[in-house]
Image (tube, grey):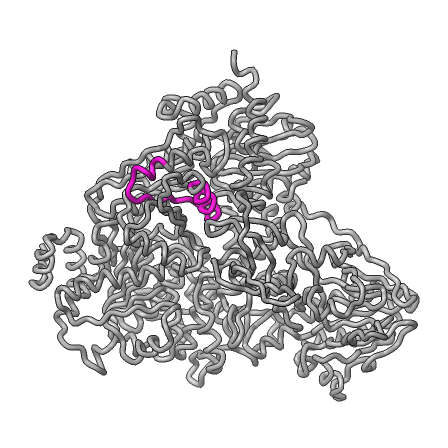
């Protein structure tokens, strides 16, 4: 058993703590020089466990040399959130101060002042707390290699939230770079509980003993396709001996003790569970009552606009004048800080928030977590529930508020999933090439690189283990000259070969421009929302004043001056757009005129969908549900059918002058939208005249001029629609353009920032569309088009999930021709006609149309 | 048909639906491509091709695709093939910068010669390409002029400011890259457009990589004494859009940060 050094053991004793098992195991891993992944629920002293080995090491070091070996950064801490670095600094300083250690800790984020940044370069702190974007920037520094030569340890906090995606790709490449600067560096990951820790272990691991690859071996390197198997068979045919399959066993897995099981309740409304909807408006009084019973409640919603809506609804009935706050990513940073500080002081009773408060910041003594509308995934739910009672041995309390009957099923499924410790699984992620291009350019800005050596370094990074030499060459060519078949840019190359055959950036000007544009996150074009003031005189010109927050540009494009909308908890009147500001004035309307954009942002997770499907087919399981939901299921069985878990129900029926086809794949809104796009193309070819479609997380509806009940449904849902039909549609789709824009920005084809002027999202969007059109006609196999296509397929379209679903239901479609709508189809049918108005405040319009429809469905139901 | 479906089914493209207007007694056909056709003179006019804009960015380290000249010439060639003009006039800024001509790919350069063969070919000077056009060594086909007259029209690159006594009757110009934003189905669509008050006419930029300036920008709006009409380039049709519709959506000062590229 590992024991702590005396200084540390005393400190624990003075605080009447005893070190937890996983903290000691992390210390042991540190002493053994092993990489480690700590998987533990919130509240288990995870961050301290990550830092303890470094603190112990630094405590034994003695005074720090001013220059030379040992004078550099000892431990680099990376967190996905800027705010977390400040929080961690505060928590880390407590033991350092109380033990009396001479350890210098500093933070560095995009907001850090230039003078402090310069000081950090000249006099590196022992522990530097920063973000992955800063790491990408370090990699592009001249002299990065010597700056990080002393690095002993990198700690990645909340690694589960970041590893799978472009940000994770860039982070992994940055780790590879650091490892080459400091070969002895330990990698330490801190993660919330996840379904399969081995995935993160594989991602975290460095390649064991990079095999030397001579010139002659290059022919032996096969152009391995990037597929799931390539992890198991690395492209390095020349590597001596077998490589560990994913290198994951190089990372010691430390598991924290599970916390006390959470107490999760699903709110069963007094009245009834609504047929459709996604806001939970009906339950607001009960939510308010729950807030009154708690000390501090966090109310999680799935979108920003939903948070505005719930916040407004709560204030309307806030007769006790409870201090209730609002927190979401669009609010001005200053306003968010205010809410956070008020929480920490205990001044608030409730905060309505989005995923901005998902991650591990301790702002106060939260004792109740309320999830408004279904959580869409069990992992996110666990993370959110962990916000309550940040102490391991006390159970967290949570209340789920389903917004509709299907959501009632989903909440019940999520509750059971949490009880079973079943988490959502993540799809396998393969490193993207636009991100790699950014990294390669960064490396060239930092120092001249040898292609072979860099290839070896990159293929040692988890997401890029399957990268072929040809793909790498393509990326380097892209970085140099844009990767065009028409080779007219060779003399303008951004990176050039040195006499000894290495590659480096052409000049400092180009390096400087790259450094201004580093970082993998691309946000949609946003406008600052500012309160308009009037400049005097007859012109009555409006001038931008105080900033309230930021919001997506497209939202304002649909407004006309005078329209009122809800933002930052208030109703505003839109006045116009000036430059990158949306000007607003205070409005007196109680109800905003323009509804906010609704819909849930996260699609229903695959594992939760499985559970819902299984629950639906099992009448015994229905007993856990409230009576009106049970009746609804029974009525569905009587009027139409309840499909078994492996089949898909398709209903067809006439309504009004139209014909409807409603299917129930339960695969989430993204996959359903893609499916509808493809189905309607086929239906159009079949001559039934499709008129429109709508989707929910559970079902989809298509309506047409001619009846669809005689169509061969097996042929209609053939998986081959994912071939040519998908390609043809994708080419024209605006999603491809959006996806291409992201890739163009990340890869550096388009610069977001140029010296002197910041490009607005508007300008960027416009020019990338032009580039997209020209490029797809003249070089359809260009690297960025391939990357954009792959991104769109996986992210925006959920094609992989759709493919699995189509294969699952092949030959198992259960067709139910009906004479009128079934109980199940109500939620999707009430979406019709409001997909544009969409959303929260439109609920009232919805209520009216829903009531008619429900009456129609329920007609004759009573004997 | 609902909005989601409209995006799915791309309608088959129809032949160019153009719009006819009268300017200073001349019939002007505003083409879907953004070019102007004068049937009485069998003359095709296009403004602001900005050839080699991609390579101009590349020379500064931003590797935009090198296919913009090709894409622009493809469209010009299609117009020439359809209309068989006796005269082609390019309204200035045909080349993006001073060194654009030598940067052109050989086949693009040869295509210019081929297109010009057998017809009058006129380059009007623009602020971007004055130097490119006056360098005599380039051997471009056709003639270079500062401006010219054709029937009742005066063709020039940059529109002249309006004065109290002169509303620039019959002026046909480019330079400003007019674009209009139209809001429909809850989404704004921004497209290049012609803009005219029946007295003068400004052409949209014809080049593949050319951005646009909102017609409500004073640089454009101040040129007109009365409310002009925008002829917005759709996919297969030119849409006549009233000034009210262009000016309304964003209200206020709609000055965009757009620059003339």
Q: Nearer the viewer, residue A433 or B210?
A: B210
**How many numbered markers are drawn?**
0
Give the residue at x 21% y 79%.
A69
**Residue B50, picture quadrant:** bottom right
Q: Position of residue B143 (x, y in %)?
A: 83, 81
Considering only vertical position in the picture, is A621 above or below A240? above
**In the depicted structure, whether residue A164 falls above or below residue B194:** above
Give the residue drawn at x 9%, y 59%. Answer: A9
**What main secondary structure does the magenta stretch of the protein show?**
helix
Q: Quadrant of the N terminus of chain A?
A: bottom left
- Say if the magenta span includes residue B254: no
Where is residue B199? Give x, y as percent: 85, 67
State the residue in front, B218 or A516: B218
Q: Residue furthest front?
A: A537
**Does residue A293 show up magenta in the picture?**
yes
Query: Percent from the top left, x then y, of residue A356?
Result: 39, 53
The residue closer to the viewer here, B123 or A356, is A356
Position of B67 compared to A336: left or right?
right
Relative side of B6 to A56, left or right: right
Image quarter for residue B179?
bottom right
Q: Is residue B127 something that shows in the picture?
A: yes
A293 relative to A805 in the view: left or right: left
Q: Residue at x 38, y 49 (%)?
A: A325
Which span is picked out in magenta? A289-314
Q: Residue at x 82, y 66 (%)?
A: B36
Task: Tell me, yes or no, if residue A184 can be seen here.
Answer: no
Which residue ends up furthest to the top in the rendered image? A863
Above-or-below relation of A240 to A638: below
Q: Position of residue A31 (x, y in %)?
A: 15, 63
Q: Is residue A660 left or right of residue A548?
A: right
């Amino acid at each position: 058993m590992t024991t702590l050094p005396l200084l540390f053991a005393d400190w624990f004793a003075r605080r009447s703590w005893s070190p937890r098992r996983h903290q000691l195991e992390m210390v042991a891993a540190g002493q053994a020089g092993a990489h480690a992944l700590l998987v533990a629920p919130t509240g288990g002293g995870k961050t301290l466990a990550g830092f303890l080995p470094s603190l112990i090491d630094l405590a034994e070091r003695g005074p720090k040399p001013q220059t030379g070996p040992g004078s550099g950064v000892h431990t680099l801490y990376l967190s996905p959130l800027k705010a977390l670095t400040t929080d961690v600094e505060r928590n880390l300083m407590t033991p350092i101060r109380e033990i009396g250690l001479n350890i210098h800790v500093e933070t560095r984020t995009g907001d850090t002042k230039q003078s402090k940044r310069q000081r950090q370069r000249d006099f590196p702190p022992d522990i530097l707390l920063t973000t992955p974007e800063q790491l990408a920037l370090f990699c592009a520094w001249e002299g990065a290699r010597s700056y990080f030569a002393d690095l002993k340890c990198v700690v990645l906090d909340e690694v589960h939230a970041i590893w799978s995606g472009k940000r994770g790709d860039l982070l992994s490449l940055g780790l590879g770079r650091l490892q080459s600067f400091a070969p002895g560096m330990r990698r330490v990951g801190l993660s919330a509980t996840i379904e399969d820790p081995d995935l993160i272990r594989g991602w975290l691991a460095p390649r064991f003993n990079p095999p030397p690859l001579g010139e002659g071996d290059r022919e032996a390197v096969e152009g391995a396709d990037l597929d799931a198997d390539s992890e198991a068979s690395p492209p390095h045919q020349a590597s001596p001996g077998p490589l560990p399959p994913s290198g994951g066993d190089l990372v010691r897995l430390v598991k924290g003790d599970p916390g006390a099981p959470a107490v999760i309740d699903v709110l069963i409304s007094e009245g009834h569970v609504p047929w459709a909807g996604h806001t939970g408006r009906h339950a607001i009084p009960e939510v308010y009552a729950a807030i009154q019973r708690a000390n501090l409640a966090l109310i999680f919603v799935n979108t920003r606009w939903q948070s505005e809506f719930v916040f407004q609804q709560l204030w309307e009935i806030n007769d006790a004048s409870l201090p209730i706050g609002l927190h979401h990513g669009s609010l001005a940073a200053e306003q968010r800080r205010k809410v956070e500080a008020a929480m920490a002081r205990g001044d608030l009773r409730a905060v309505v928030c989005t995923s901005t408060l998902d991650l591990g910041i301790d702002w106060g003594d939260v004792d109740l977590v309320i999830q408004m509308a279904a959580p869409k995934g069990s992992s996110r739910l666990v993370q959110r529930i962990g916000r309550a009672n940040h102490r391991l041995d006390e159970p967290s309390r949570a209340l789920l508020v389903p917004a509709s009957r299907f959501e009632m099923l989903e909440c019940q499924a999520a509750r059971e999933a949490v009880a079973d410790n079943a988490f959502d699984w993540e799809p396998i992620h393969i490193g993207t090439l636009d991100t790699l291009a950014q990294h390669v350019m960064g490396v060239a800005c930092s120092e001249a690189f040898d292609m072979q050596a860099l290839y070896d370094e990159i293929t040692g990074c988890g997401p890029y283990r399957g990268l072929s030499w040809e793909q790498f060459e393509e990326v380097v060519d892209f970085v140099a000259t844009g990767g065009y078949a028409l080779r007219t840019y060779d003399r303008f190359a951004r990176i050039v070969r040195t006499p000894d055959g290495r590659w480096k950036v052409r000049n400092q000007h180009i390096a400087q421009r790259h450094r201004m544009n580093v970082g993998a996150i691309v946000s949609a074009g946003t406008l600052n929302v500012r309160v308009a003031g009037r400049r005097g005189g007859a012109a009555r010109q409006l001038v931008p004043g105080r900033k309230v927050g930021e919001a997506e540009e497209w939202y304002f494009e649909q407004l006309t001056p005078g329209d009122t909308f809800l933002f930052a908890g208030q109703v505003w009147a839109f006045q116009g757009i000036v430059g990158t500001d949306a000007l607003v004035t205070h409005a007196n309307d109680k109800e905003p005129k323009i509804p906010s954009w609704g819909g849930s942002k996260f699609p229903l997770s695959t594992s939760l969908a499985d559970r819902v499907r299984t629950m639906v087919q099992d009448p015994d399981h229905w007993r856990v549900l409230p009576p009106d939901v049970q009746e609804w299921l029974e009525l569905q069985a009587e009027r139409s059918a309840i499909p078994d878990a492996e089949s898909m129900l398709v209903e067809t029926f006439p309504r009004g002058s139209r014909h409807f086809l409603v299917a129930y794949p339960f695969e989430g809104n993204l996959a359903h939208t893609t499916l509808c796009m493809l189905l309607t193309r086929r239906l159009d070819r079949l001559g039934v005249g499709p008129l429109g479609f709508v989707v929910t997380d559970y079902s989809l509806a298509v309506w047409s001029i001619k009846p669809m009940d005689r169509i061969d449904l097996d042929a209609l849902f053939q998986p081959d629609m994912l071939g040519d039909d998908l390609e043809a549609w994708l080419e024209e789709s605006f999603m491809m353009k959006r996806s291409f824009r992201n890739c163009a920005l990340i890869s550096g084809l388009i610069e977001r920032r140029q010296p002197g002027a910041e490009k607005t999202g508007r300008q960027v969007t416009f020019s990338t569309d032009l580039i997209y059109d020209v490029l797809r006609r003249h070089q359809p196999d260009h690297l960025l088009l391939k990357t954009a296509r792959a991104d769109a397929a996986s992210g925006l379209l959920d094609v992989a999930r759709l493919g699995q679903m189509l294969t699952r239901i092949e030959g198992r479609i259960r067709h139910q021709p009906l004479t009128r709508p079934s109980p199940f189809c109500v939620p999707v049918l009430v979406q019709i006609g409001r997909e544009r108005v969409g959303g929260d405040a439109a609920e009232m319009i919805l209520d009216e149309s829903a009531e008619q429809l429900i009456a129609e469905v329920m007609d004759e139901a009573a004997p | 048909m609902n909005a989601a479906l409209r995006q799915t089914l791309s309608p088959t493209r129809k032949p160019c639906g153009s719009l006819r207007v009268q300017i200073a007694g001349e019939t002007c056909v505003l083409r879907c491509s953004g070019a102007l056709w004068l049937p009485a003179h069998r003359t095709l006019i296009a403004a602001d091709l900005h050839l080699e804009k991609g390579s101009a960015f590349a020379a500064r380290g931003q590797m935009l695709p090198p296919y913009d000249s090709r894409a622009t010439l493809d469209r010009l060639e299609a117009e020439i093939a359809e209309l068989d003009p006796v005269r082609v006039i390019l309204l200035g800024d045909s080349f993006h910068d001073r060194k654009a001509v030598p940067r052109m790919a050989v086949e693009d350069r040869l295509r210019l010669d081929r297109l010009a063969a057998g017809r009058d070919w006129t380059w009007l000077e623009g602020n971007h390409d004055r130097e490119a056009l006056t360098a005599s060594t380039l051997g471009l086909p056709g003639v270079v002029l500062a401006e010219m007259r054709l029937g009742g029209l005066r063709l020039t690159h940059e529109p002249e400011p309006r004065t109290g006594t002169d509303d620039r009757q019959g002026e046909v110009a480019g330079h400003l890259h007019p674009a209009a934003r139209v809001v429909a189905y809850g989404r704004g669509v921004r497209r290049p457009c012609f803009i005219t008050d029946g007295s003068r006419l400004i052409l949209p930029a014809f080049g593949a990589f050319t951005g646009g300036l909102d017609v409500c920008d004073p640089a454009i709006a101040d040129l007109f004494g009365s409310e002009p009409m925008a002829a917005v380039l759709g996919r297969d049709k030119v849409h006549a859009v009233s000034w009210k519709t262009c000016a309304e959506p964003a209200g206020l000062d709609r000055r965009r940060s757009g620059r003339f590229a």
